[in-house]
Image: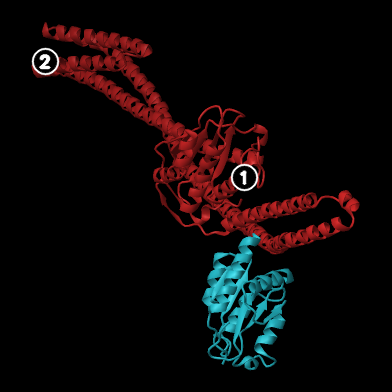
Amino acid sequence: MNSKMSQEPVEIIMIEDDEGHARLIEKNIRRAGVNNRITPFTNGTDAVSFLFGPDGSAATNKNKPLLILLDLNLPDMTGVDILGRVKSNEHLKRIPVVVLTTTDDATEIQRCYDLGCNVYITKPVDYENFANAIRQLGLFFSVIQVPATN
Amino acid sequence: MPTSFSTNRNLAQPLLLLAGFALLIGISIGTLWLVDRAADDARSVAHTLRVQDMMSNVLLNMRRAEAGQRGYLFTEASRYLDDYNDAGPAAEEQLRLVREQTADNPRRKGELDAIERTMNGKFAEMDRSIELTKAGNRDAARTFVLGDRGRELMNDLRQQIEKLIDDEGRLLTERNEASQRTNRWLLILTILGAALVVVVGGIAVLLMRRNVAQREAARQELAVINANLERIVEFRTADLVEANEEIQRFAYIVSHDLRSPLVNIMGFTSELEALRKDIFDEIGKLRAQLDELNAHAAAQATPVETLGKDFDEALGFIKTSIAKMDRLINAVLKLSREGRRQFNPETIDMNEMLGSIEQTVAHRAAEQEAKVTIDDLPAVESDRLAIEQIFSNLIDNALKYGRTSEPSRIAVTGHANAAYVSFDVSDNGRGIDPHDHQRVFELFRRSGVQDKPGEGIGLAHVRALVRRMGGTLKLKSELGKGSTFTVTLPRRWTENTRSIA
């Protein structure tokens, strides 16, 4: 994955409470030839404290090229909250956020895009479709430009 | 309040009024009768007075005649004779008039006859004395008069007439009394009538006021009951709506959360499948090596192909089950989503809609040689998508479950009344066992020979939609004789039409 604005390789933050899903997503991203570091979080609290740091300002992630893979159904909070906070934070708002979830409810999709989500993908139950979707996402990761946080 | 009581009172009021009016009418008739009688009384009094007057005149004229006779006898002047000749017929004329007036009184007739006899006697006596005088026989006349016959006759006459006048006077008193009585009665009756009018009027006003008060009380009671009822209905409706929404949310959450592990099961099963190839390749290679070392053991081992087949079978079952589960979950999800979807009512040309549905199934229908006929259908104001789904499903089912022995005939007919429109979707297909008429509308339930793919969702979906639109869905069907689904919908759907179902 390229990053013109930063010399560091892009780090993928995967917020997904289901470890099985996380594993399948990682497998298929790797199969697409993406070797960037993937940092998994299985709950919202840990992910938020990583993203926003101890003081909640996200200053710790300044100048880091990040990409967020976000599930909406988390045990401790909804992914929509995290999305809203990321997109309204001075340092994190330019991070591409890919919502990857089982919900295909139209109002939910609309709400995510309204909040600034960049891509919304529904996890298909059919594994072939699932694997295909993730692999294409991986291919997409390998070509997109990600700005560093600032 | 008890019904019998109020019924009695309801009956008592008009009866009371009726009695009041009957009394009034009675009093009016009585008054009229009394007035008539008073007039009669007045007439008889006048009559009596007239008779008395006439009788007095008779006596007066008789006296005048006597005076004339005496004057003549005394003076022999013919003018006294004129007086006599004038008064005599006048007395007779008066008597005749009295006879006319009292023709209805036989007793009076006898009395008058007696009077007339006396009068005639008197006239005869007077004529005789005048004749004697005229003949110049004054002494004989004087002797004749001195015989006192004339005086006695005149006394008799006076007594007779006075008796009659007295008699009439008595009658007058009686009649006057009767007249007074009548007048008293008239007065009493009039006062009674007036009092009764006041009483009946008062009762009527009282009854009316009580009626009005009762009506007002009933109206208020009704208003209170209505308000209560409305509140109860509101509560119940709110409860039901809430329960319904909760079920919808529950269905959505459950189906959604069930999907999540399914992704894993499916995913790792597929991963296993991918691994299988590697494992069996490895086993194949190991077997080959083993064959070289120990031919006997290799012969006893299960062939790799059999192992692979069992493995594939197990994976196959897992995968089809997952796929099925996914379809079921999707169905629940779809129903729950439909249940939450906002309806947008608009006027729908049903002919146009059924026409376009027919177009979409035209290809399939042609393949099966099926024929779809659509009658002239009434328009309906409702949600377009929901209506389309209802009829698409019904026509789809009709096409799907035809009989092999003859081509399908599907007919859509409709009619409307003031508030509702009904549509019949009939086919000549395989029909549904009456036993299963309830079942086919349940989710995931099907009926009859399971030779067509399907999850048992369509009719459940249709029924949920029809109910949400405040309509009903009825089925008439016999096994082997086709089915008729009747969809009845409100002509105009509004938010309030929504039925809790």
Asked whether the viewer can see residue B119, the reply is: yes
**For the residues marked 1 and 2, what is the alpha-carbon distance in whole angstroms?**
157 Å
Q: Label 1: state its secondary structure.
A: loop
Report the label total: 2
Q: Is residue B65 left or right of residue B269?
A: left
SS for callout 2: loop
Q: Residue furthest left?
A: B78
Q: Position of residue B312 (x, y in %)?
A: 74, 52
Residue at 65% across, 86% down: A51
Q: Chain of mark 1?
A: B
Disc 2 marks which amino acid?
Answer: Glu
> Which residue is nearer to you in this view: B181 or B385?
B385
Q: Which mark is residue B353?
A: none
Look at mark 1 in the image and give the residue it sits on: B454
In the rendered structure, which disc, 1 or 2, sits on the residue that comes first in sequence? 2
Q: Is residue A125 visible?
A: no
Q: Is residue B86 left or right of residue B34?
A: left
Chain painted red: B
Counting from the top left corner in percent of width and height, residue B350 is at 42, 44
Q: What residue would you read off at disc 2?
A: B76
**In this view of the protein, which residue sits in the foreground, B127 or A145?**
A145
Q: Amino acid at mark 1?
A: Gly
Query: Mark 2: few, some, or many residues within 10 Å (few <14, many ≥20)?
Result: some
